[in-house]
Image (cartoon, rainbow, N blue to C red):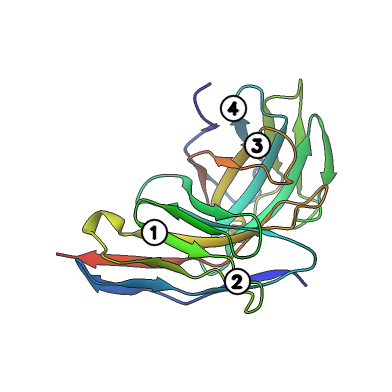
């Protein structure tokens, strides 16, 4: 069935390190792909999205490219900050009537100074 | 309102009791979603409303779970005869129209603890 798989955490990095969080998906049709972030004590927020193959979503220094050939949507940031510490969720939307988001299990990122 | 609101923010109940969780979506959003976030399970979809009707109830885990939406706005998720495995954070989201290509905005969640 349709699903999202993202790398297990926790991911622990020092400030200014390079970040990659892997995400792959299985889906029929032409899904849209998303990264959501949940900061400590807060609700889920959309971080970035891509609606078709080869689109690159970007926000707050984070980027992810929709790769249909590898069914991937890896999240990257060149230089992380302590304030990026959060749980990151990869998700897809099948874009079919009556369906909602399918989420990965989440990856906890901890950045130390 | 400015964002999706949920109440209560925390609920502690005893096993076997019924609970009601409320979601107030962003004004004008026609679609509303309930998800459950529990340790080890990630985020699970529960139910989706388009207006007052629920085209997709496939995620409701058992017949103890039900939800309704009235007036195309506020929604209530009801869990009857709560069990310890129902302990989780229940998240509500809304989108301007249906799920197709529409961003979902999430509320802060209700943390439910069943003792």
SS assignment at label 3: strand
In the image, taking residue B88 as reference, residue A97 lies left or right, namely: right
- Cα separation between marks 4 and 1: 27 Å
The answer to whether the residue labelled 4 contacts the one labelled 1, judged by CB atoms less than 8 Å apart, is no
In the image, taking residue A46 as reference, residue A103 lies left or right, namely: right
Q: Residue at x 57, y 45 (%)?
A: B91
- Same chain, labels 3 and 1: no
**In the rendered view of the protein, which quadrant contains the N terminus of chain A?**
bottom right
In the image, taking residue A45 as reference, residue A15 lies left or right, namely: left
Which chain contains the residue that carries disc 2? A
Badge 1, how many Cα within 10 Å: few under 14, some, many 20+?
Answer: some
Residue B87 visible, this orientation:
no
Residue A103 visible, this orientation:
yes
Q: Is residue A108 above or below residue A9?
A: above
Q: How many marks?
A: 4
Residue assigned mark 1? A62
Q: Residue at x 47, y 46 (%)?
A: A45
Which chain contains the residue that carries disc 4? B
Of B36 and A24, nearer the camera is: A24
Residue assigned mark 4? B26
SS assignment at label 2: loop
């Amino acid at each position: 069935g349709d699903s999202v798989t993202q790398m297990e955490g926790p991911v622990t990095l020092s400030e200014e390190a390079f970040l990659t969080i892997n995400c792959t998906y299985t889906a029929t049709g032409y899904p849209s792909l998303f990264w959501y972030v949940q900061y400590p004590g807060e609700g889920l927020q959309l971080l970035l999205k891509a609606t078709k193959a080869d689109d690159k979503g970007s926000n707050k220094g984070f980027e992810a490219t929709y790769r249909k050939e590898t069914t991937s949507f890896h999240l990257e940031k060149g230089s992380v900050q302590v304030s990026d510490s959060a749980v990151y969720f990869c998700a897809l939307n099948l874009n079919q009537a009556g369906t909602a988001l399918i989420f990965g299990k989440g990856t906890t990122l901890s950045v130390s100074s | 309102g400015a964002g999706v609101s949920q109440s209560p923010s925390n609920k502690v109940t005893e096993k076997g009791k019924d609970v009601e969780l409320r979601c107030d979506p962003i004004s004008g959003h026609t679609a509303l979603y309930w998800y459950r976030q529990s340790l080890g399970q990630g985020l699970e979809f529960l139910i989706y409303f388009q207006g007052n009707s629920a085209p997709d109830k496939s995620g409701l885990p058992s017949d103890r779970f039900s939800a309704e939406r009235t007036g195309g706005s506020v929604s209530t998720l009801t869990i009857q005869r709560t069990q310890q495995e129902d302990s989780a954070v229940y998240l509500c989201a809304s989108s301007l129209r249906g799920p197709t290509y529409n961003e979902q905005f999430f509320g802060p969640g209700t943390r439910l603890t069943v003792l």
